[in-house]
Each structure stands twice: as C-alpha cells, then as structure tokens.
Image: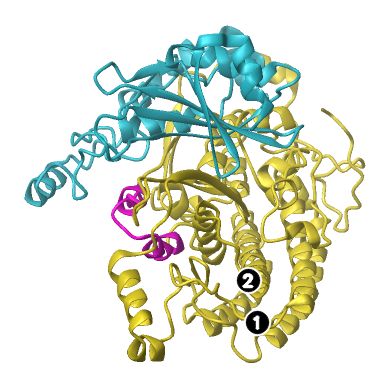
Chain colours: A cyan, B yellow
Amino acid sequence: MNPSADALKRQFGAAVRRVTESCGTTIVYIDPTRVREILAWLKDAPGEAYNYLADVTAVEYRDADLPLEVVYELFSLSRRVGLRVKAALPKDGALELDSVVPLWAGADWLEREVFDMFGIRFHGHPDLRRILMWETYAEGHPLRKDFPLRGRFSRSEQVRQALNANPEAHYSLAELGIAEAYYELPADLRERLSRGERGRIADAKGGR
Amino acid sequence: MARKRTLEVALGTTTVDPHGMPTTVPLGFETPDASAVETAPELGGEHMLLNIGPQHPATHGVLRLVVELDGEVVVRVIPHVGYLHSGFEKLGEYRHYNQLVPLTDRMDYLAPMSNNVCLAMAVERLMGLEITERCKVLRVIACEISRIISHLVWLGTTGIDLGAVTPFLWLFQEREKFYNLQEAWTGARMTTTLTRVGGLMADIPDGFEDGVRAHCRSLLKVMAEVDRALTRNGIWAGRTQGIGVLTGDEAINMSLSGPMLRASGVDYDVRKDRPYLDYETYDFEVPVGEHGDVYDRYLVRFEEILQSVRILEQALTRLPDGPINVDDHRVILPPKHAAMTSMESMIHHFKQVMEGVRVPAGEVYSPLESPKGELAYYFVSDGTAKPVRWRVRPPAFINLSAIAKMSEGHLLSDLIAINASVDIVMGEVDR
C-alpha cells in the first residue's frame, strides 16, 4: 500500500472516502468536490511530489447503480511512484467537478475527451468542447453504457445528416472571428508584431 | 535558457552563427533596418485565417490546424482532431481480450507490434500471469523493431517536410527490410496482431535472427550517412534549432512523454523507470536532450535508434529456447490434434473460443515505452471475458496537445517543423 494514502487521510480526513489496491497500485477515492485541492496538495507537497499527470479518464460500470468514476493517474517523476486517484460521481447528481487544467496544462485535451465521451463537465476548464466527435454531434456521449454500439440514430438518419451537412461550414465562430482578433490583442504585442519580432508570444502576455 | 551550443557546421551557410545558434536571417535576405520599420504603416488587422489539412501531406495524417497568421508569424493554432476516430475503446467493451489485439494494430500503425505487446502485458498483469522467458525476449525484439521502424519513418518524413529528400529514400529502404522480417514472422507488414494473452501467435521463423543482425548492420551504415547529411548541416540546424522550445517543467506540466519529454531534459523512460519484460537487465542508455527544441528531438530519436540496435543485439544473444506460450489452458488454445482427440482439451478449446479469456475483477494501468512515448492500456474488469472499460493512454494525442503552445510566435514554415517533431500517428491520436 502506498504511504501517500495514509498521508492523504491525515491531511484531508473524511474527504478521502476509501482506499483500495489493484495489481499493485493504490487507488484513493476522494470527495469529487475537493478534487483540485487534493490533487494540488499531491502535486506540491514535498513528500508526495506527484508532478506528472499520466492520464485522466472516466469509467462507467455495467451495473447501472454504480457511480461514474473520474480517474486521475498520477506519477512522481522524482520518486518514481504511481498513485491512482478516483472521484465517484453518482449518476442521479450533476456530472460535474473541478478541472485540473490550472494544475496541469496536459489535462486540457484529456478532460475534453472525458467530456466528449462521458458528458462529465469540468468547472474552470478554459475550452471545454468536444474533441474527437464533431461539434454538432447530437447523439450523446459515446462511451456511456446506455449508448448503443452503433449510435443512437438509425443508419439512414446518420446518412441523411451527413448528406445535409454544409460542407462550407468548416470554421467555428471563434475561428471566423480571427479576422477581427488583431484589435483585441494587447497593445505591446501588436507593436511587437508590427515590428516583425519573432519568438514566443505567450511569454509577453504571461501565457494565454 | 540561452545556453550556447557547440556545433561544427560542415556546410558553410549563413544560417548558423559561430556558437551554433541559428541566426534569424533567412538565406538571401537582409535584416530590416529598424528605423525604416518604425515609419512603416502598421499592417496589423489583416490577420489571416489559414486552414491546413485535414488532407495535407505536412500534417502527417488527417490532422487539421486552423492557424491565425500575422503576416508569416503564427499567432494562434487551433488543432482539430477526430477525423480518424473509430471508437476502438467502445468497440473493446464488446470484444474478448484476444479480439482486441487486431484493434491495437490499427492505432499506432507505424509500431503495431509494441501496441500488441502492451495489450497482452496489461491483461497478463491483470491475471497475474507469468509469461515464458523466450516470449519475454521475443517481445523485447518486437518492441525494439517497432521503435526502429517508427523512428525511421519519423526521420524520413520530417526530413521531407524540411526539404531533405535523400535521407527519406535511404531510411525507407532500411525500414522495408525490417518490414520484410515482420512479415516473415507475423504474415503481415503492418497489421501484425502478434501477441496473444499468455504468449505469441507464432514463434520466429528460420533465419529471422540472422536477418535482424544483418539489417542492423546495414542500418548502422545508413544512420552514419544520415548523420553526416543532417546533424551538422547548416540548413537542417537552422530550420530546427531554437524552434518549438519547451522547457523541462513545461513538458512535465503538459504530460508529454517519450522523445518529446526527454528532448526537454527530463530523464523519464518507462523502460528504465517502470521496467517491464526485464528491460532493467539490458544495457542501454536513455538519450536526454538539453534545449527542448526540434533539433534535440531529432538527436534523441536518432540516438534511440542506435540504442534499439544495441538492445536487439543483446536480446538475440540471450534468446533462450523453450515454449513461447504459457502452459495454461485458461488462456492458450490447446494444440489442434489434442483438441480433436482428448475430451478435456476439446472443452478448453470450446470454452476459449466461445467464451474468451476470463479475467479476474480488478483494474490495471499498464504503461510501455512505445516509440511515441508512454503508451498505456487501462483495463477495468468485472470478472467476465470482456472489459468494462478499455482506456488507451495515447502518447501522440497528449504530445500533440502541446502544439499550440510550441508554435505561437514562430513562422508558418516552423509550424511544419514543430508539427513533424511531435511524431503523431493519427490512428492513435483519434483511436
């Protein structure tokens, strides 16, 4: 059993719901409302230092009464130890929890995929939209157990929608706004760009 | 950040200064006079929206990048993925574990054998199954051949993206030799479906070991030539150095893995740090970069090919005789003659074909160092023959998510270099 589990219990008490183990990895179930706080502690506490977020995903069980689980696969690059943290979301409640993008930029696409596939919403995610399915996809969230393998719509309906899609509608509204976007850039950046300066734009603005 | 490189430039071009850092002056252009620029009218506001892909050779598959350009400078990149989404994870919930192996071929199709190994390894960990010694060594050989093939394709196509066509031809010739070996072993060039839970679908054919040795020798010669053609080439260095820089902390924060992470100076290789298949007993080095730019990613992958050759040589030397499959009729089909003559074997055969391999309840996250990075399969089992959840941790998908940050502020032509340096395979990104 990973000693981090006991450390978490000491630090957060009842927010650590239960601890199990499977195939040598310790699994800690935590309170879904305190995900960001607990993961931030695991990331930064000196004795823990789980600084590498290997994966974010979700699991839905075949038993419909069991809650959905959001799974965070952590790894400490300095200590070479892994830990799995799970937050269980009951299906009758709102499928929402805090995003960990402020902690790890790598969670961006991973959380978008979980949202796309399971419909779980992440508060504080900078750009939560579908990633693997297209933006106008209307059949739901494919990895949910109540989603049939062939999709919700009939094959003829899927074909009809594909044929009726406007092939010119390539761009999202955000992208179409790019033509005017220049005037929304900060003045210093506009000036640097007009001088022909090259290099990292993000540095000048403190990250975008 | 601005550590100086020492680099001998073989070809006298003006793109690299004496310290080996690329100068910002493109060939044949003068530096614009600063006073002249100040008086020039501001041309901003004419930001251009440029769409690259999904059908574009420089995007290495069906990746689509919507780029906001200010003149030639990339202001913003909005990547769109999913054009090759096949729903493998959903499909996996309706298949037996051994039936997932063909699906893994189609993810990272440049390194199918290491995907196969990753799947078998994950299920075996879940079952607590110990595979035979010969199988372990053969799987190491499979993984390293995959790494060589994948890196050869990467190096060749990246060379083409940056205007170096010759290495592509040399490298693809070498790759073809390894594909011939792969075909002799598994019967297919790309869709290998090599592993089964508890073993392999076939032992290596006659002459395979000699073939690997001979091809490794010729590969080293070609790599030496590519080294001479690229590593100290002024144009190559100018196009790649200082481009798409990520610091080690940024790379960790973005969950990058594989050569992308190591080029930024982070020493993390699953083979060394979470060993599997007895990798800890092989003698090899993990190359680590310093600057985290496209050039360092090139150097890291280049060195990884050479290290893979070292591992292959050691694996061939130690390859023991013996069975390739575990002696366990829960997972391995009995031989055909036994299934036809003995009642017990026939029952095993029937149960396995009809019901599949039963895996005890539990869950496992099983990582492997694929050519692209940390490839992991996360299985949740409820004790039946089909997984409740099959999650693929796709290294290329996560590495690609860094492209927006890497390419901001660079030239459009550098975006092509940066995109190439990620080493994406869209089959894996979209799954």
Q: Secondary structure at mark 1?
A: loop
Query: Is residue B276 something one can see in this rendering?
Result: yes
Q: Is residue B404 above or below residue B223?
A: above
| Chain letter for the residue marked with disc 2 in the picture | B
> Residue B365 at x, y = what percent?
53, 44
Amino acid type shown at disc 2? Thr
Q: Nearer the viewer, residue B175 or A68?
A: A68
Residue matched to label 1 = B322
Can residue B89 be found in the magenta stretch?
A: yes
Residue B132 appears at what percent x and percent y?
Answer: 63, 71
Label located before the other in sequence (1 or 2): 2
Task: Note whether B311 is above or below A163 in the view shown.
Answer: below
Front residue of this view, candidates B359 and B207: B359
Q: Which mark is residue B132?
A: 2
Identity of the amino acid at label 1? Gly
Can the viewer see residue B39 in this picture? no
x and y percent of residue B396 in the render?
54, 47
Q: Is residue B182 left or right of residue A80?
A: left
**Chain of the residue under label 1:** B
Q: Which residue is located at x 9 percent, y 47 percent?
A: A154
Q: Name the spot of residue A208 as percent of width and height, x first.
A: 55, 17
Q: Are marks 1 and 2 in contact (CB under 8 Å)?
A: yes
The answer to whether B144 appears left or right of B427 in the picture is right
Q: Is residue B84 left or right of residue B284?
A: left
- What range is drawn magenta here? B83-105
Q: Secondary structure at mark 2?
A: loop
The quadrant of the picture occupied by the N terminus of chain B is top right
